Image: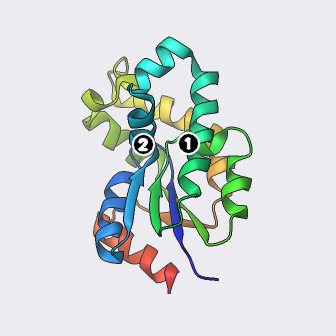
Amino acid sequence: MEINKIILLGYMGSGKSAVGSLLKDQLESDYLDLDYYMEDKMRSNIPDIFKSKGEIYFRKMERHYLEEVLEIKNPLILSIGGGTPCYYDSMVYMNSLPGVMTIYLNTSVKELSRRLFEATSDRPLLKYLDTMEAFQEFVGKHLFERSVFYNQAQYSVRTDGKTIAEVVTEIKKILT
């Protein structure tokens, strides 16, 4: 079966956007970040959508736009939000589509905490966490809850201690 779409999933800070951008260049494919796609379509940013409409509405729209994007005929690399695989039957749905490959960017709690701690200004959800220990506790709990969904991906690539280029090289090996 020929792969037409690659879906990158994982926790925030796992490198989905960076890996997707470099992979797009190397495979000469289109790249889309589902969060940015949703913001464009809904003419609002995700924190504002959560605040004004609530999480249930957000998750419903997220699933709608996931399906819309996956109906695009062109080859595509898609990164999805950290929560996307955890709602409805999204992992079963993505894994059931012909020509679609799901890849979990598997990153340890320690590494995710380090990356997110260094980028708190970019992550409003994490602004209230002020110590590395608080980050590790928050990320550890969240990752534990979500790992049952992430581990349903067809492939898993460890990212700890690897450059973006090294992760992309591993993904390209999976494709061959």
Secondary structure category for the residue under label 2: helix
Mark 2, residue position? 37
Residue 144 can be seen, yes or no: no
Residue in view at x 40 percent, y 33 percent:
39
- The image quarter containing residue 120 is top left
Q: CA distance from mark 1 to mark 2?
A: 8 Å
Badge 2 local density, few (<14 within 10 Å), some, or many (20+)? some
* Image side of residue 148 versus residue 10, left or right: right
Mark 1, residue position? 65
Which residue is more in the foreground, 171 or 160? Answer: 171
- The image quarter containing residue 166 is bottom left
Q: Name the spot of residue 22 as percent of width and height, x first.
A: 29, 66
Residue in view at x 38 percent, y 26 percent:
45
* Image side of residue 113 versus residue 119, left or right: right
Disc 2 residue type (three-letter): Tyr
**Location of residue 60 with respect to 63 vertically, above or below:** above
Callouts 1 and 2 close, C-beta under 8 Å: yes
Q: Name the spot of residue 60 as percent of width and height, x first.
A: 64, 31
- Indicate the quadrant containing the N terminus: top left, top right, bottom left or bottom right: bottom right
